[in-house]
Amino acid sequence: MKTALALLFIHVNWLLFAVSVVSAASLNPDDVLDVANLVPAGQYYEATVPDTLDLAERARAAINPMVNIINPDQHHYSWTNVVWREPIQLHALTWNLPCEYLFSLPLARTMCGSDQGVGVELGTMRSYLDGLADDGVIYCPIEDLGKPKGSCFPDNIGFVAFAMANWYERDGNAKWLDYLTTLCRGFEKMAIKVEDRAFYPPEYCYLPDGTWVPEGRGKLPPFDGNEPTSDKQGFEGAVKYYHAAPLQAFAKCYAYTGDPRSRQMAHRLKRFMLRPGFWQESAGESYDDVEKGMFTGHLHGNLIPLWALLNLALAEDDDALKQMVRSGYEHSRRYTTAGMGWSPTYINREDWSPHPYPFGDSCNIADSAVLAVKLSDAGLGDYWDDAESIARNQLAENQFMDKAKMQRFLGGDPESAKWADRFYGGFFQTEPTNLYPRRTPMMPGCCIGSGPWGLYFVWHGITRFDRGVATVNLFLNRASAWMDIDSYVPYEGKVVLRNKKAHTAIVRIPGWLAMDEVMFFVNDQPADPARLEHRVILNGLEAGDVIRLEFPIEERTEKVYMNGMSYTLTFRGPTLIEISPRNTEQDIFPTYEREHLKSKTAPTRTVQRFVAVKLIPLP
């Protein structure tokens, strides 16, 4: 009886919404799709810089696999995974991942100015817009990993909506907001409402008649109409995750337009996601597991919801929700190796069958960088050291940046060189000292899409500018319209700031460095700037001034336990230069081969730097 009533509710909800939904018939993809808008306006100039980690260069490389993993001949679906073995394997096509690339490509292009694959990017967005029906729902054109042709998977389309916010920020075309609002009406139609909550059956697909069918993975039973009660339900065990992208869509629509229906739906999803069964039980401890954001299981599947909840909290200035997200991030840090940034795909993975994966995913590593920056910006803590260590270490090691090394691993034949060129810049899954799986490393399509958003958040946070004041948060390379940062770390304890517009610079000194060990020079003259906590303030700057920071950079070792083993880590400043013990098995692809970083002199090179006229605000 309960199931019958629930299914009746679905159909009644669908019929009521059908009379009020905003028609999509008036929306024309040609009104928003212009290839000229995909490449950011900006300035290129030549500079001789230290040859150290450059996140803009990493973003340029990351664009390469995002546009190459998409198949334009199959409705711009992408391959699910690239498996590096002889011969190279491309797993089945899916529409579940190109939506992530549509989110990340505008961010990566803003960093580096690349126009690679703009036609593929445009065609991919068009493929989704062409699937938009009059009910506000985007239906897939062909079968997708068991998702039936003509169905909608809310998580996919939620990311399309979230991507639209970046496209709107890139070109300023207000018609993107019409699309965003229309998609939110579609999400509202699909949602199953229970009391003051709303949910989408996780890992089920919505059909135009209002029914839900299981996707192909995991052999799920027919939908019984009941509201999920545990995060473990479904194939991946990530119920909250499948509501995060629709929540991002509602939160963005409300933030941009003030749409009350989007706000109401955002709160319905929030109340569903905050149900006690979706969080780690406190086992009688003196804290509320939901209020503290305690969780277990799929790490990416929990960090993505925290990101969505934080965006809603910021839109609403909801302090309690902000504090919950901060506590959830702090909880995740317990499972992240400090200074290195490695974290497991599943927490307590032995309890989360069928996925006892013993590797770290680029997805959760990038998510950690996102939250570190957003929480720092929101005044909810100082997590800048987290962001820098993630970028310098695990996120960098998870990215494929050495073609010659990959070709040697594959045997060095011309065919492997072709594939190395095609997917150079993609992101892998890793164990602490090598790629995983060991003999057939996998580059998941999800990691190809999420790694770049981790790069963007850290890059964006390196330096900021407001009313003549430049803030420098991280000792990483960055070109900007107001100041360029040249970092000699980890080879030398030196950072050079080349001022363009600022009259004041506020420089954050990282936690691994004592304030009194730093010497300051302006135009080669010693300076004694004012100190405020762990920041210094340099006033009276003029365009063309060169500020130099010099400091000792020492090696230190730390003992850590991760992935079921004890390791010794050797750092030089914030950079991990050695890890032991290493996996000594044959035919593995090793990571952290960083002997060159032990030199005491930074190499230099001449590069073309790019500065975009407009930055995309952090999503």
Image (spheres, rainbow, N blue to C red):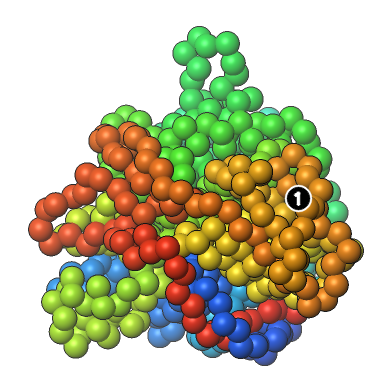
Look at the picture and state if 441 lies above or below 228.
below
The C terminus - image quarter: bottom right
Which amino acid type corresponds to the residue marked 1 in the rendered image?
Answer: Val
With 131 as the anchor, is 358 left or right in this view?
Answer: left
The quarter of the picture where residue 179 lies is bottom right
Which residue is drawn at the image coordinates 44% and 68% (left, top)? Answer: 601
Look at the picture and state if 520 lies above or below 478.
above
Look at the picture and state if 423 lies above or below 138.
below
Depth order, front residue of 359/191:
359
The quarter of the picture where residue 469 lies is bottom right
Q: Position of residue 508 (x, y in %)?
A: 69, 50
With 11 as the anchor, is 345 left or right in this view?
Answer: left
Is residue 505 something that shows in the picture? yes
Label 1 sits on a secondary structure element that is: strand
Look at the picture and state if 477 lies above or below 47.
above
Is residue 182 something that shows in the picture? no
Which residue is drawn at the image coordinates 78% and 73% (left, top)? Answer: 545
With 137 as the anchor, is 426 left or right in this view?
Answer: left
Q: Which residue is mark 1?
A: 536
Q: Position of residue 94 (x, y in %)?
A: 40, 67
With 599 as the anchor, is 503 left or right in this view?
Answer: right
The quarter of the picture where residue 48 lies is bottom right
Q: How many residues crowd around disc 1 within 10 Å: few (fewer than 14), some, or many (20 or more)?
A: some
Depth order, front residue of 559/618:
559
Q: Position of residue 118 (x, y in %)?
A: 55, 85
Q: Position of residue 296 (x, y in %)?
A: 44, 31
Which residue is drawn at the image coordinates 78% and 77% (left, top)? Answer: 544
Q: Hey, which residue is sitting farthest left in the picture?
A: 586
Which residue is drawn at the image coordinates 46% and 69% (left, top)? Answer: 602
